[in-house]
Amino acid sequence: MKGPRTALALLSLTLLAGGSGLAFDTGHHADLTREVLGEFGMNDTAIRVAQVENWLVDYYSSSPTAFGEVERAAAKLHADNLFSREAVTNYWDRYTTNARSAFREAARTGNARQVLALLGMSLHTVQDFYSHSNWAELHLPPAGVDYATVTWFDASAAQREGVKTGKASTSGDTTQTPHGGYISGMNHDSYVRPNWDRAYVLAYAGERQWVNQVRAWVSEVDPAVWERARTLTLEGKYLSRLNSDHDAMYRISEWVKSGGEDGHWKGNGSGARSDFLAYSAAWVAFTLDSVFVEDFKDRRWHGLLAGGRGDALDLNVNAPPPAPAPAVARLALNKRAVLLRTVAARDLNGADRTLGLGGDADLYARVSVNNQEFVEAMQLDRESIRPAWTTLRFVDADLPVVAVHYELWDEDGPGRGDDEHLDVHPDGRFKNLDFFYNMNTRRLGGIGIDGVFDSPARPLVTRGTADDRARLTLFVTTKTLARTPVRRPPGDGPLPLPPLRETR
């Protein structure tokens, strides 16, 4: 039976790209999900399950393998086509009603995997709201602060005035601002778009608050279920399948190339049609072996959030829910951000290119900041990268120093050997950059690195010395976030669970 499924995949996968721009690009969704769930003590397996289910919201919003209600329900989870404050309010009130019911039911049945699946799916919606709306434009940073952090659930009625989201293809209203793509529209889906960083910070604040509330909903029913979700263990074929699905999340998003789409990991420029078709067809052929795909496509747990399953309210209905919506508790936020921007990267291993014997490098970076790795967007056949890679990492506001590890790679693609690990360190004993960054003085310190390199006008420029060498230009700076204190007016929902602290 593998042959027919593979043929179907090859015939239809070119249609998948049309829905790829429905959300923050996959890499940004994955980074945000990992960052916040890590703060809540989730282990790597639990985080990867949530990341995969988060991605499947996008995949099955457009995949021809979804069919019918699976696709229709997934399309409702992007916070699109909400053209007034009233429409946004009704959407969130219906959504939180559905979410509380779904998480409580998962807790009652003791299904820790369902908690994680619903968590990944629901985080997609939370993240998309800030990416797809004009919230970032309505809420400018307070004086003396780099980023606003006011969330939908914290905002007053006055602060919600004027909010709306972009028009997706599911709406025929031609008077509204389209969601758009990389060069136009309302979206903030990747770091090629204006105010991407503001939307990203707002999404971070919003999802911390959301995960805290989900933890409360589950723990009110059975705290042990939350603990099992947090420490999920998989073995054998289940772990193997999760790894395969997690790889597909990256590769399909990176290589998508069709209908004007040119990659959707983090910005455009990584699309590779042959790689996309071959990899996607192989993955689709084996999705029936994946319990995580079954949870979405067959068990349709996403319908518990979007409507169409049980008593779940339809999110496409612009009306208040029949009963008051549950509150989402406020959560203190006292964070700063490390912003690392790679301004330029160039492969200097250029003898073959000078002679015209090969194409340009397919550069990508692996950047770890305080033990979280960020894979920045591969740039296919480009002499130097564009757009500039931007890495944002959130840390406790009183954390004085963070560790940074930087690797630069030239991708060879599937079946073409190992990726080439480029040397970017001026000392011949090392390939990678490793340094400490002082959050207060903005000084970098490490072997061969010492100084303040905190702006485009004052960058760090470094180059390797080996045959496989490259030149990097980057800077690192500190960004401040508006602080959110915990306030508890009457009826403001359950008390937050114990405060979260960054692991040092």
Image (spheres, rainbow, N blue to C red):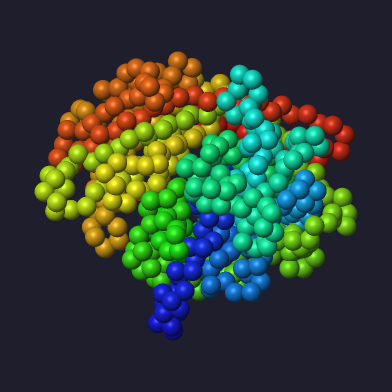
246 versus 200 height, above or below? below
- Image position of 504 (left or right of 223): left
Which quarter of the figure is the N terminus placed in?
bottom left
- Image position of 379 (left or right of 185): left
Image quadrant assignment for residue 447? top left
- Give 70 or 216, whichever is nearer the viewer: 70
Residue drawn 53% across and 48% down? 184
Residue drawn 56% across and 39% down? 200
53 versus 215 height, above or below? below
- Regarding residue 93, the answer to whether it shows in the image is no
x and y percent of residue 190 in the render?
50, 45
- Image position of 459 (left or right of 40): left
- Give 201 or 415, whichever is nearer the viewer: 201
x and y percent of residue 496 in the render?
73, 36
Q: Residue furthest front?
A: 175
Please state the total of marks drawn on the protein image: 0
299 versus 243 height, above or below? below
Residue drawn 49% across and 69% down? 15
- Image position of 362 (left or right of 116): left
Image quadrant assignment for residue 209? top right
- Regarding residue 376, the answer to whether it shows in the image is yes
x and y percent of residue 271 in the render?
38, 57
Q: Residue furthest top?
A: 441
x and y percent of residue 35 in the render?
53, 41
Residue drawn 77% across and 68% down? 310
- Give 421 or 371, whichever is nearer the viewer: 421
